[in-house]
Image (spheres, rainbow, N blue to C red):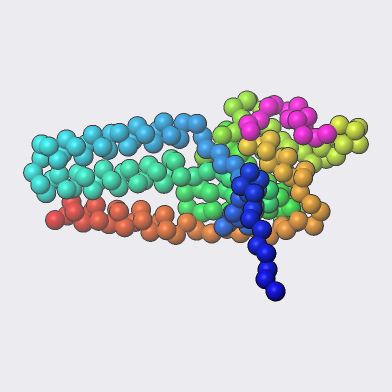
Amino acid sequence: MFAVRQRSDPSLPTRPPADPVTGSNVADQTFRSTSAWAYTLVVWAFCGLCAVLAILQEPALTAVRVVLTSATVALLAWAVLLRPHLRVTDAAVVVSNVWRTHVIPFGAVAYVRTRGLVEVVVREGERERVYRSWNAPGNTARRPRVSDPQARNHLRRMGVSPQGHSHALSAGSGAAGRLIEERMDAAAPGAPTSIRSNWNLPIIAAVLAALVVTVGAWSL
C-alpha cells in the first residue's frame, strides 16, 4: 500500500515556530523605549565619525586604537541602550535587562505597575518581588497605574469585560502594560508559575573581551 501525502495549502496561515525561550507558538510582541534607537544611533554616529577621522589623519597605531575604542563604545551602547527590552508572549513576560533575563509566566504575575518603567510584581508568600524592565516604555503620568486583580474581578461581577476598562482604575498606561493584563486575564487556571532567571553570559563575555582588547591596545 502506498501512503498518499497531501500537499499543504499555501494560502492557509502557517503556525509560527515556537519561541526558544518561552516555548510559545503565538507571535510575541517586543517593547523598547522610543528613545533607545535615537540615543544608540547618536552614539554609533559619533563612534563612526571618530573612527573615520582617525583612519584619515592619525598614524596607524593610533588609528587602530581609536577604531577599537569606537567599536567598544558602540558595543556598550547596544548592550546598555538598545538590547534591553520587554517581550510578551501568550505564556510569559520576558524581561531582558543588561545583565540578566527573567522569564515570568503569567501564572506567577500578581499585578503590573507602569510609570516610567514597566514593573512586573510577583508575590512570594508575604513578600513581593519586582522585576523592572529597564527599557520598556511605561506611563509618563504622575500617578502609577496599577493592574489590580481584585478590581478586574469586580468588573467581571458587574458583567464588564476587564480588557479595555481596567486601565480606567487609575492613570492610563502604555501598550506593554495593557497587553500583559490581557494575557493575564486569558491565562488558563493552573498555568505554570516557575520563574527562570539567567545571566546574559554571551553579552557579558563580549563586552569584557572588547574592553580587554581595547585596554591592551592602548597599553602597547
Q: Which residues are magenta?
A: 161-175
The percent coordinates of residue 184 (x first, y second) are: 74, 45
| Residue 112 in sight from this viewpoint | no
Q: Residue 4's image quarter?
A: bottom right
Up/down of 187 relative to 153, above or below: below
**Is 113 placed left or right of 56 in the picture?**
right
Q: Nearer the viewer, residue 3 or 143?
A: 3
The percent coordinates of residue 19 (x first, y second) are: 59, 54
Up/down of 166 relative to 121, above or below: above
**Is 157 placed left or right of 201 in the picture?**
right
Q: Residue 170's image quarter?
A: top right
Q: Is residue 168 magenta?
A: yes
**Is 200 placed left or right of 10 in the picture?**
left
Task: Kindly give the residue lying farthest to the left in the view shown.
Answer: 59
The quadrant the C terminus occupies is bottom left
| Residue 72 in sight from this viewpoint | yes
The percent coordinates of residue 110 (x first, y second) are: 73, 47
Residue at 37%, 34% in the rendered image: 41
Up/down of 124 relative to 29, above or below: below
Query: Magenta stretch: dominant SS?
Result: loop
Residue at 43%, 34% in the rendered image: 37
Residue at 32%, 37% in the rendered image: 44
Q: Nearer the viewer, residue 15 or 149?
A: 15
